[in-house]
Image (cartoon, rainbow, N blue to C red):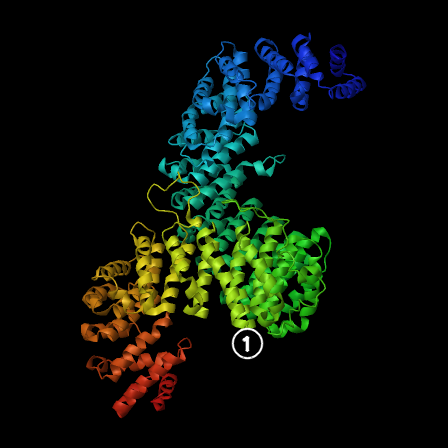
Amino acid sequence: MAQSLELLLIQFLMPDNDARRQAEEQIKRLAKDPQVVPALVQHLRTAKTPNVRQLAAVLLRKKITGHWAKLSPQLKQLVKQSLIESITMEHSPPVRRASANVVSIIAKYAVTAGEWPDLLPFLFQCSQSAQEDLREVALILFSSLTETIGNAFQPYFVDLQALLLKCLQDEASNRVRVAALKAVGSFLEFTSDGDDLVKFRQFIPSILNVARQCLASGEEDVAVIAFEIFDELIESPAPLLGDSVKSIVQFALEVSSSQNLESNTRHQAIQIVSWLAKYKSNSLKKYKLVIPILQVMCPLLAESNNSNEDDDLAPDRAAAEVIDTIAVNLPKHVLPAILEFSSLSSQDTNPKFREASVTALGIVSEGCVDLMRDKLEPVLHIVLGALRDPEQMVRGAASFALGQFAEYLQPEIVSHYESVLPCILNALEDASDEVKEKSYYALAAFCENMGEEILPFLDPLMGKLLAALQSSPRNLQETCMSAIGSVASAAEQAFIPYAERVLELMKLFMVLTNDEDLQSRARATELVGIVAMCVGRGRMEPIIHPFMEAAVLGFGLEFSELREYTHGFFSNVAEIMDDDDGSAVDIDESDDENINGFGGVSSDDEAHDEPRVRNISIRTGVLDEKAAATQALGLFALHTKNSFAPYLEESVKILVKHSEYFHEDVRLQAVISLKHILTAAHAIFCNSNDGQAKALEILDRVMNIYIKTMTEDDDKEVVAQACMSVADIIKDYGYMAVEPYMQRLVDGTLTLLREEAACQQPENDSDIDDDGDTAHDEVLMDAVSDLLPAFAKAMGPHFAPIFAKLFEPLMKFAKSSRPPQDRTMVVASLAEVAQNMGAPIGGYVDGDSFLQRLMHLVLKELASSDATNRRNAAFCVGELCKNGGELSVKYYGDVLRGLYPLFGDSEPDNAVRDNAAGAVARMIMTYPQSIPLNQVLPVLLKALPLKEDHEESMAVYSCISTLLFSSNPQILAVVPDLVNVFAQVVVSPVESPEVKAEIGRAFSHLVSQYGQQMQPLLSNLSPAHANALAAFAPRS
């Protein structure tokens, strides 16, 4: 075989294709025989030309796996010995490397079986050889062997790390340094032990040196390995970087801004900065690297794209990702630099920089949302100016930025509608389709949160949108429909005059079946559902069936986004019809399997299920459809109630399964829908004999899911929704419904307050914030803190011992180091607990230290710079004084001094003033003898009538009424002022009948006591006010 094989190897290397093909076929036949191994080994050792020896090694690598176990021990030894000789004595580098590849394959079997004990010592010996070639090949083998026998290196790990570091610093050979760099990458990928990983920190300076040398010599593909190594180090939970972050960032920024390098190389460098921003943001803050990063990334936004370049590698796109990530993680450190860049660049003569100026503002609007709200004037000045720029690219970027602002800077952005909407209206007529498309996006996002403010613009808006809908290309029609949907949502019933025309146009879109048109059909389906919500059942019911039929047919087109929007459409229809007989949404009689089987939501649909993986977020069209279908299922249950009975059990199974789905969007909708299912079950079973048992069974399943979600789900929004749903269940069904779960609910609440739940664990334990401001989510903690008032309202004074356990963890959020929204959350929660729990708020803890701590907190918050904090503090202090018993009296003086500024002209917020009035009223009602009424009443009356927070009305006007009925001399002195206040209250459209009745009783008492003396006071009122008050007099 050896002789014939040599000829075939030579023939295989010939340029003649036919000869090569014949040789390949015969080699394949011979390779089935185990004897091909010694024959190839012989040619590896003895063939005269390097090409033949290399080919022998390549074929040996391919065939050795199938034959190794069949070889005798002697033959195995021959193979190993021949390979070692080839590596040490072969003059041709390609042959040596080919032999090394064979070694890595054989080692997988021989080393693990104990048949090659001298391999690793041999490699260590080679790596320290004076011969450059041997050092290089040893490192190459170390790299490849990690994939096959990585565990065998464990006893040698310390020695191996020292060797790799030495080779990285090899002054004699660039090839050895490059091989060492690749080996470091291989070992880092294999290593999982934290202690072993930390030792790689000392490699970073050498890795950077090698990478710089590779870039200088044009070996960019090798330099990229350095970024792959840094990627591993950054994502590791071990603290691997230390102060090396500075040198890594410096190198990455150098590469990012080097336009002479390949796109992929620059992209890898920018990506490293992005990973650092995501996983090590506090290190960037600690070493003051945010500004240097932004100084490089912002100009990259203005870098021109190469038309032949893959968009995913474009520097401007990658830089935008970095800026966005830093803004989300370190907003305070980002916005000033972005504003400076945008202000300067907006005046630049280069349109790319003017485009970058507004693009940057749009990018950071999500992360810097709280800070940008206070800077809207200068920001809008830049963006609205860019919307008038002569260059299309700048106008398009400005429209994008406005859309971002409309999405994230609510509600403040809407207050600028008078300047923003006319600019968007002009942009809708731009000569560029790209600008138009982005303007529709901006309009859609802006109008979505408007109300009656849109009415003056409604006619010109709809004129432009309807015209565009009939004359634009498909992509513009889609964004146009989205904009019309937002306008309709904002205008509500004022949209009725335009509804018929819009619905007629939507019929044309809802019958499209070509693949390229299905996106438009999806948008049309969504829009019909929105218009239906605006015009109501009366107008939609006679015309709904063609739209329903078109929507059902759309399910059969297998387009996930169309199915997603169709679920939303059905949800809207179910809501406006909201009938108990289910006639409007008769899913029972449909023969469409997707409707009967809840298309896209079935519990048997495993095709797209994935195991739950923490911190992985994947978005697909199928996933969006599943989330929409899960939402629709709950809304069907909520709005059809009794008619949903045939689907109840299957729906519960589906939602239980989806509550553990791998993606948080689906879990969120499942958690919301389970509460709707509970509402439907209550309606379905309330009148049946065994209904209570069935309803309790569903309640049990739902509560168990919510309690598990609270502590085990890793998404904060899902957990927040579970907490809100529990609070709603307590409110709807009372304490008895949740009593069996109370201990677990309290334990779950305690876990969340201690920030020990799964969703509150940091993604990277090594990256703890240096200033101790532990990361948390405002929405989550608001939802958690709302549980306490829900418990208190259901249990009343019996909540006291439970609150004793929750108090200290809650108060942690009131520390001065916490952001203002944390403290207002605590104060709001305490206020409602005090209100609902009653007297125990002041007495269940020994002494008055508890009340003292509360008073100290709320008195401090009365002077907060945040209006919401002042408002909540005023309400809270009133409830503490009302329910704190005698212990609270000694604080009355401090409380009145704290409240007094809230009544003055310097207080800009009416709701704050209303709550201050409520607090004073509660204090008067509780301990009137402790209040200097002669000083307090004039201040209180000056704040009346209440302007905004009418939930305080009953407390305030009941206090006034009580003082009048008791003929308090201080109140009688201000009766003329009171009559004027009473008149304004009784004609107010926002005050409740109960409040007006209380005013009526007080006024009737005055009339009965003082008769004719009241007449001059009434004559000073306007006729409307006087008549309204007089109408109450007979009701005494």
Q: Quadrant of residue 982?
A: bottom left
Residue drawn at x 20%, y 62% is 847
Q: Is residue 430 visible?
A: no
Look at the image and tell me in which quarter the N terminus lies: top right
**Residue labelled with disc 1:** 687
Q: Which amino acid does label 1 sit on?
A: Asn
Image coordinates for residue 676, horizontal then vertical, percent:
53, 65
Residue drawn at x 44%, y 38% is 294
Nearest the viewer among 741 and 785 is: 741
Image coordinates for residue 677, horizontal then vertical, percent:
54, 65
Label 1 sits on a secondary structure element that is loop
Nearest the viewer among 603 and 212 is: 603
| Left or right for 692, reference 8 | left
The image shows residue 503, relative to residue 305, as above or below, that is below
Q: Can residue 53 be seen in this view?
A: yes
Residue drawn at x 52%, y 14% is 122
Image coordinates for residue 33, horizontal then vertical, percent:
73, 19
Q: Quadrant of residue 10?
A: top right
The image shows residue 236, relative to residue 486, as above or below, that is above
Total label count?
A: 1
| Left or right for 863, reference 156 | left
Nearest the viewer among 90 and 953 is: 90
Image coordinates for residue 1011, horizontal then vertical, percent:
27, 92
Look at the image and tell me in which quarter the C terminus lies: bottom left
Nearest the viewer among 869 and 744 is: 744
Q: How crowded is mark 1: few (under 14 residues within 10 Å), some or many (20 or more)?
A: few
